[in-house]
Amino acid sequence: MSIKERRERERAERERLIVTAARELAEAEGWDAVTTRRLAAEIEYSQPVLYSHFKGKDAIMVAVAVQGFAEMAGELRAAGTSAPGPREALAAVAEAYAAFADRRPALYDAMFVRAVDLPFATPEAPAALREAFASLHRVIEPLAGDEDPDALTETFWSGLHGLITLMRSGRLRRESHDRRLALLIGHFSPPA
Amino acid sequence: MSIKERRERERAERERLIVTAARELAEAEGWDAVTTRRLAAEIEYSQPVLYSHFKGKDAIMVAVAVQGFAEMAGELRAAGTSAPGPREALAAVAEAYAAFADRRPALYDAMFVRAVDLPFATPEAPAALREAFASLHRVIEPLAGDEDPDALTETFWSGLHGLITLMRSGRLRRESHDRRLALLIGHFSPPA
DNA sequence: CTTTCATTCCTAGCAGCGCTAGAAGTAGCC
DNA sequence: GGCTACTTCTAGCGCTGCTAGGAATGAAAG
């Protein structure tokens, strides 16, 4: 049995290598630069090897996205707990979200813009994704009043996502990002 | 001179034909189906003809997007004027925006998701685009209070855009769209 | 009416893409 | 050492956006 185990270990190792290479290539040059040929060269195997691990290029992007969810969940969680009041907590999590998107644009793309073969608003969604959403939910809920906390969280999230994607595509000026973010936060916080 | 004029007229006609064909193909089957070969076949000319009118495929998408801005501007303007109060006006325009995006997903994509070779937050932006934005601005301004109306409009717009894109990519459940939209509107309206 | 010339347009092809069939090589087992 | 099963590679398919170079067209000149 030990031979088989070793092989499975090596296989898993190579799978990690693929995901890491894809992520690094995407972060360095964008997802358009991540072609199956480039990726194969990077891991020093031939192209078809990729397809013995993943169904296709999209599946590789999904794997990268899942890594991203885990990281984001950690950062949002940290941001949410170290705040004095509910209003500050919301601001901290929102800013952490925006900072993550800004620091890891390619990762954010894989998570929220490109890959779609991923269950989102269901219990089958990846645990890390549900956890990241929960961090948002946790800081929204105390401010929900008589409103539906789930829908409110989704709405606030949409606001963040819109700010980020429109800014990144050059449709919103970067200079006024902080002002817009503050406005969004303000409009989802109690009236002072 | 008349011969040259006739030719220019025919050329302009063919250019319209290209844009229309691209738009119809995109709306029927999505932008992935709009290949230069498909498009050339649709207008019954060879591929290179497209490149004598447009720099590339992206430029064709930009032309389609500009058409979209004009239509959206008209619809938003109409929605904004036929409302009794400022709160209702905001709701009407927001719903018109969401309805447009829902009815013409491919067009919305060209306008706000894909094509990027287009000046946005500057005076050089297409007139129709600035007009569409102005319709949003017009209904936000009365509700701005002491806040910056420009930044507030951009923030509200981001909220709409986020709702739409996240829903369309399957990341938000369609059933609760109305509830989210109402929450967004409510949080940018006076406290009752 | 024919020839010249400029313009328009098409055929053919390049380099790249995601993906896959089938051959070649490698490793474990008897 | 020889057989078997698995792994990995080479080669290629059909597609993409885009372009060079030649063929056809039609207006102007003799």
Image: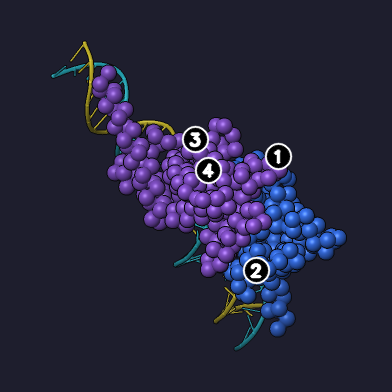
Chain colours: A purple, B blue, C yellow, D cyan
Work out whether residue C17 or residue A8 is closer to the camera in this orientation and state it.
Answer: A8
Q: Quadrant of the N terminus of chain A?
A: top left
What residue does disc 2 label? B148
Task: Determine which residue is flagged by label 1.
Answer: B175
Find residue A127 and name its label: 3
Dot 1 amino acid type: Glu
Q: Of A86 and B43, which appears nearest the observer?
A: A86
Q: Which residue is mark 4?
A: A135
Q: Taking A168 as reference, is A45 above or below it?
A: above
Q: Which quarter of the picture shows residue B59?
A: bottom right
Q: How far separated are the C-alphas under marks 4 and 1?
A: 23 Å
Q: Chain of mark 2?
A: B
The 10 Å Cα crowd at callout 1, few under 14, some 14 to 19, many 20 or more, is few
Label 2 is placed on what type of residue? Asp
- Callout 4 amino acid: Ser
The residue drawn where x is 70% and y is 39% is B175
- Give the residue at x 61% y 44%: A142
> Which of pointers 3 and 1 indicates the residue nearer the eye?
3
Residue located 40% across and 53% down the image: A27
Same chain for the residues under marks 4 and 1 in the image: no
Whether labels 2 and 1 share one chain:
yes
